Amino acid sequence: MDEATGTGLPNRPGAQRMRWKYLDNILTRHGPFTDPDWEPGEAAIEGLARAKLLGAGGLGCEILKNLALSGFQDIHVIDMDTIDVSNLNRQFLFRQADVGKYKAEVAAKFVEKRVKGVKITPYCGKIQDKDEEYYKQFAIIVCGLDSIEARRWINATLVGMVDDQDPDSMKPLIDGGTEGFKGQARVIFPTMTSCIECQLDMHAPRAAVPLCTLATIPRQPQHCIEWAHIIAWEEERKDITLDNDDPEHITWLYQKALTRAQEFNIPGVTYSMTQGVVKNIIPAIASTNAIVAASCCNEAFKLATSTNPFLGFPGTDNYMMYTGDESIYTYTFQHMKKSDCPVCGDDNIARPLQVDSDFTLQEFLDSLAERPEAQLKKPSIRSQEKSLYYQFPPDLREQTRPNLSKKLYELVQNGEEVVITDPAFPLTFKYKLVFK
Amino acid sequence: MLKIWSMKQKQQQDEAAATGGAKKKKVTAAQLRVQKDLSELSLGSTMKTNFPNPDDILNFTLTIEPDEGMYKGGRFIFDFKINQNFPHDPPKVKCTQKIYHPNIDLEGNVCLNILREDWKPVLNLNAVIVGLQFLFLEPNASDPLNKDAAEDLKANREGFKRNVRLSLGGGNVGKQTFDRVLK
Ligand SMILES: [Zn+2]
């Protein structure tokens, strides 16, 4: 496998390249939709093979297979999960003997074996384990994450990475997600087009059952599990932090839920249902996953090669929704960037601000009051780590007041981001404090 | 990709000053939103907050001292835990004392619709504290979390009031001993 580390084209020329015949047809000639500036041929094929991609999360099998079969040769994959028996029905890269092993590792090995010349680098862990340095190495990031939290994290990270001086710092994010028969594929150019945070309203909030129902009259097996999760754990294991990935913890919840279900004569509580409810897993339908993952990977291909117009080009459609629960319907539209988006909004990109590090915080705030774009009256200010000064509530004001007489260099580092809010304005001011 | 980048360059004519070498630490979306929410809290004279670690605005307590209703004279302390997924997720709120209330169980879990099923990201922390305050003015027997208390309230409002007074002083109601929460 080593000769195929993404440099050159180990499969060419010769019979093996036949596998890519149809792909080559696209890559070696102009079509009606190709960009006039694009050069088909050798360079296009090589560019595709060299593009380093990251695939993350739940649509893993589909995305890996599709990327490999689209001609990408340097693929990284992140997934924290291990293989469960219940995955085998649709996650086709896994076999019975793989149960218990890390998905990323098994999937990487499988695809490398089947698609010669592809190098897949697995990482078994959370996307949050990695920092900007890691994400910098990729050309495109393709995500099929199963939680909104993980999506928001990667989104904020990629938006935060964009450095106006460096074209390479903007990483297109292709995000796919499904829920039963519904799904969506979207492409985001961080800071340029509508981001996941701008689009948060597209996610239906999770349906929660009233706490009193859980406590008094459970009607469904899920209610018993939620009861074990929210109430019983707190009562009996308060001092242990619940870890959704710890089998012992899930087993404990499962036993509790089962006992409660028996009391109320409710059938149907199982271990995997417990896992599903606790981790808020939405049941996956294999074909919906396949449709959405395929759409994501085609966009990755077009983005990497410029052979055809792609979803998400600034100023055009960037969101494809697929609805299959009531007959079938797809709709592609442009979701507009929100200027007040807390992650990518124009008001929220930290502006560099030259400051005298010998200024006290009070002097700095006073100087802000004079800045034409700010003119703040009652500013509250924080950095990621510190509450620098809060006007409200009173106890926070008392606790942060001593900071007013401290010098800026004692409170923040050179280049650190601060945010300032003022009840008089709906806006937020973000500044990157650059010491003079 | 280069084409898109040149579009971006055109988009912004902003000056781009060189920044320092410090590792970029971003204020998170949750912190930002909580900061905004805090400046909009109307605590009035009956509520106050306490931040054990002032740098951490996602974890704090709220003290409510109702000045009317059956719980008047009590001092109730709620623990707020806000995660990084706020405001998509509601804050986690628990009463830190064992109190006698139909909508709060003996572990401090609170049955308030906007803390669970009716939470929406457009709601803010002020809506939550208003909701909590309301629970002390109008305890609600139809959404019971403490069934015994709810039944007491339904069966005999005056008897319920007496139980509340007893419990506030740290007395027993039924088999349970409650925390003394009088000011
Ligand atoms: Zn945004």
Image (tube, coloured by chain):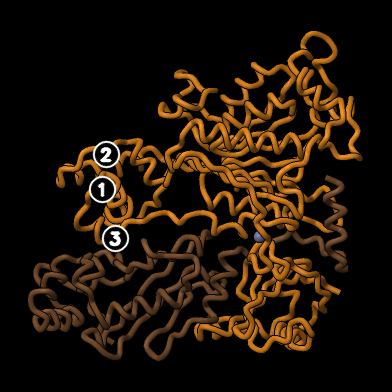
- Residue A275 image offset from top left, x and y in percent: 38, 40
Query: Between disc 2 and disc 3, whose residue precedes?
Result: 3
- Disc 3 target residue: A211
Quadrant containing the C terminus of chain B is bottom left
On the image, the x and y values in percent for residue A154 come to 63, 50
The residue wearing badge 1 is A224
Quadrant of the image occupied by residue A435 = bottom right
Type of amino acid at the residue the image marks with label 3: Leu
Query: What is the quadrant of the N terminus of chain B in the image?
Result: top right
Q: Amino acid at mark 1?
A: Cys
Element carrying mark 3? helix
Discs 1 and 3 lie in a common subunit = yes
Label 3, residues with CA under 10 Å away: few <14, some 14-19, many ≥20: many
Name the foreground residue: B33 vs A22.
A22
Q: Is residue A275 visible?
A: yes
Q: Are marks 1 and 2 in contact (CB under 8 Å)?
A: yes
**In the depicted structure, whether residue A22 falls above or below residue A246:** above
Residue B74 point in image, percent of width and height:
27, 84
Chain A rendering hue: orange
Callout 1: chain: A
> Along the line of sight, which residue is nearer the eye, A288 or B89?
A288
From this view, report whether residue A81 is shown above or below residue A393: above
Determine the colour of chain B: brown
* Same subunit, tags 2 and 3: yes
